[in-house]
Image (cartoon, helix red, strand yellow):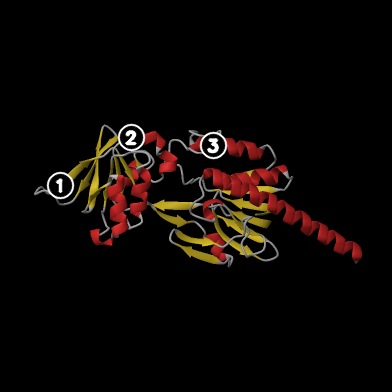
Amino acid sequence: MTDVYEVVVVGGGAAGLSAALVLGRARRRTLVVDAGEPRNAPAAHMQGYLTRDGMPPAEFLAAGREEVARYGVELVRDRAVDVRKGEDFAVVLAGGRTVRARQLVVATGLRDELPPVPGLAERFGRDVLHCPYCHGWEVRDQAFGVLATSPLSVHQALMVTQWSKDVTLFLHTVAEEELTDEDLRRLAAAGVRVVPGEVAGLVVEDDRLTGVRVTGGTPSAGGTVHDREVLFVAPRPVPQTDLVARLGAEMSETPFGTYPVVDGRGQTGVPGLWAVGNASGFAEQVVNAASRGYRAGAAINGELLMADLDAAAAAVRV
């Protein structure tokens, strides 16, 4: 079964739904394909989005889906598994359906890959956190830990001191000699304690984090427990950009993954192919992703309109 749309949006998060909202209001036949795996699903609330601060992510997305549906946008819970480009885009869905579109928006986001520390994944989004701007206010003045996975973790440890003056940097897989003199001076100035040794696991009591266990330090096999109430980590971002790469878009290697090269509107070098939200870059928060989606949606409508007018003008000349 093949269905034809003007625009197919792959990804039903803030960026994808925002693009679809603009397109629906512009009376474009639009389909949103959503696998239902938002990046912020582990979080109970999202912060920093004006008028939506503290709103549960699932509630936010439900409201977005309801809004786009008012303008005739179709939504399907499915996964795009393949894509081809000829005169238009053919998107193959896991359910067996193929949909075609003149323009394709990829808003598939990224996946957070956590360090392999026992208990970390179970606490992620609760008292194991990654972004102080997202969660710092809610855990302010508690005892923070920062799990180092690279020398860049020093920056994270310094940043979180804005929300607590009780911060411990657990070096974990980072050797002490990897820290520069500047790192050490700044950590000392910020009052951050530095603990060498690999983190073996978390201590959880009554469903809350109470400590971080570090190997060594005592004769006991269990290692040393450092009392902590919150642990910040830096997950490895894994961009979900396979569809963009398959279509031959130029990609750029960054310290935070490989992303398509896009212009200020979100358009890749492949005509008709757009990437928005975390499918276009690491640092897009929900509010930024929604803005990117809006901009792409408006640009796509303009592209379609001018293409149709040019075709009509050419037909008149003939």
User: Horizontal placement of 188 versus 37: left or right?
Assistant: left
Say if mark 2 contacts mark 1, CB within 8 Å: no
Q: Amino acid at mark 1?
A: Gly
Q: Residue at the location (68% across, 37% down)?
A: 70
Check residue 222 in the rendering and tell me which mark sits there, or answer none: 1
Alpha carbons under labels 2 and 1: distance apart = 28 Å
Q: Amino acid at mark 3?
A: Phe
Camera sees residue 129: no
- Provide residue 290's location: percent of width, then percent of height: 58, 45
How many residues crowd around disc 1 within 10 Å: few (fewer than 14), some, or many (20 or more)? some
Q: Quadrant of the C terminus?
A: bottom right
Give SS at disc 2.
Answer: loop
- Provide residue 34's location: percent of width, then percent of height: 55, 47
Q: Amino acid at mark 2?
A: Asp
- Would you place residue 3 above or below residue 83 in this image? above
Q: To which residue does mark 3 refer?
A: 60
- Would you place residue 277 above or below residue 136 in this image? below
- Residue at the far right in the pictured view: 317
How many residues crowd around disc 3 within 10 Å: few (fewer than 14), some, or many (20 or more)? some
Give SS at disc 3.
Answer: helix
Disc with the residue nearer the chain's start (3 vs 2): 3
Number of numbered discs present? Answer: 3
Q: Quadrant of the N terminus?
A: bottom right
User: Which of the two marks, 3 or 2, is nearer to us in this view?
Assistant: 2
Give SS at disc 1.
Answer: loop
